Amino acid sequence: MADIDTALKGAMTIDGAIGAALVDYGSGLALGVVGGGTQHDMNVAAAGNTDVVRAQMRTLEMVGVRDSIEDVLITLDTEYHLIRLIPPTRSGDTFFLYLILDKARANLGLARYHLRKIEADLVV
């Protein structure tokens, strides 16, 4: 079992990791952030990607898809932005892990594998 800080530090060990956050997508607030450097404000990115998650969920509902979202991938010229949804807690809280990767250094398959593992061990 890993707390938020441990989980985010683990995410930063993924090859190519630039920044990571754990986000409450009910409120859009980041519960924890690491990395990002001068190029990425992880708190702003976390809040903005909350809109991405909400829009995708609404769209799936409108078209009648009953599957749940595992992750969302945004591919830029030089980066991957990976959003990994965490199943709702017993109290109904909803979270996602957000990871920015350098496309030249990252292996997307391995990054998804590691995020799944981090998610499984995470205690919020």
Image (spheres, rainbow, N blue to C red):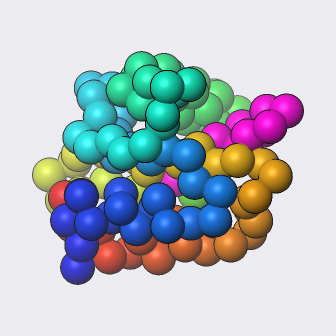
Q: Is the N terminus in the top left, top right, bottom left or bottom right quadrant? A: bottom left
Residue 97 position within the rendered picture, expressed as x and y whole percent measured from the top left: 43, 50
Is there any visible trace of residue 85 in the rendered image?
no
Was residue 74 drawn as part of the magenta stretch in this picture?
yes
Residue located farthest toward the left when viewing the structure as drawn:
91
Residue 64 position within the rendered picture, expressed as x and y whole percent measured from the top left: 66, 39
Which residue does the image show at 44% across and 24% down from the upper left?
41
Residue 109 position within the rendered picture, expressed as x and y whole percent measured from the top left: 74, 69
Which residue does the image show at 35% across and 34% down from the upper left?
25
- How many marks the image carries: the answer is 0
Q: Which residues are magenta?
A: 71-85
Which residue does the image show at 55% across and 72% down from the upper left?
114
Was residue 89 drawn as part of the magenta stretch in this picture?
no
Mostly what secondary structure, the magenta segment? Answer: strand
Judged left or right of residue 80, residue 42 is: left
Q: Is the C terminus in the top left, top right, bottom left or bottom right quadrant? A: bottom left
Judged left or right of residue 59, residue 37 is: left
Judged left or right of residue 17, residue 36 is: left
Residue 93 position within the rendered picture, expressed as x and y whole percent measured from the top left: 23, 45
Q: Is residue 112 above or below residue 46?
A: below
- Name the foreground residue: 8 vs 85: 8
Displayed quadrant of residue 59: top right
Which residue does the image show at 14% across and 52% down from the upper left?
91
Is there any visible trace of residue 62 in the rendered image?
yes
Q: Is residue 102 above or below residue 45?
A: below
